Amino acid sequence: METYTKQITYEVDGNGNATAVVEHEFISPPNNPAKCIPIDPENRDYKKLLKDVVAGDAEIVDVDATVLPTFADKRQKPTSQGGYGTWQEQLEILGEQGIGTFQQHITNVKTAHPKPV
């Protein structure tokens, strides 16, 4: 029996969490994982796949292919989005608000986006 993978990618919200909204999905054959079989009833490869599944010669396994941002990705956002910000933004905080505010900003980002254990 051949095992096909159904790659599902979900939309990611502004907080870096996967939503229930499917952004993209396709099926890959076991002998050619780079090939994409569109999920389309009119596609001949998809029709053959479904025929093989019904006959018991193939199965489809769902795989969540969503790439979520890491804590580092979240920390590197602009300050307006809760990240460290660019070096220019960080210098602006230092220059205009002082070292205490800057240190608190860094602490807030680290608290909001902790390193995984």
Image (cartoon, helix red, strand yellow):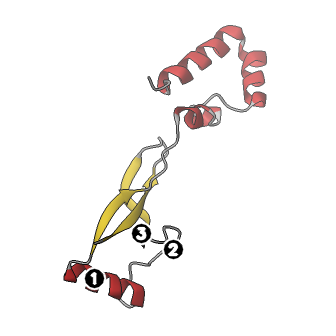
Query: What residue is shown with label 2?
Result: 35
SS for tag 2? loop
Percent of width and height locating residue 26: 43, 71
Residue drawn 44% across the image and 78% down it? 37
Q: Position of residue 69 (x, y in %)?
A: 52, 42
Q: Is residue 104 above or below residue 68?
A: above
Instruction: Name the mark on residue 11.
Output: none
Q: At which x and y percent is residue 33?
A: 48, 67
Q: Secondary structure at mark 3?
A: loop
Q: Is residue 108 left or right of residue 101?
A: left
> Splitting the image into 4 quarters, where does residue 109 fall?
top right
Q: Nearer the viewer, residue 92 or 32?
A: 32
As drawn, is 64 to the left or to the right of 80?
Answer: left
Front residue (pair 89, 67): 67
The answer to whether mark 2 and mark 3 are in CB contact below 8 A is no
What residue is at 64 percent from the left and 28 percent from the top? 84
Q: CA distance from mark 3 to mark 1?
A: 13 Å
Residue topped by disc 1: 52
Instruction: Give above or below for 81 relative to 84.
Output: below
What type is the residue that disc 2 sits on? Answer: Lys
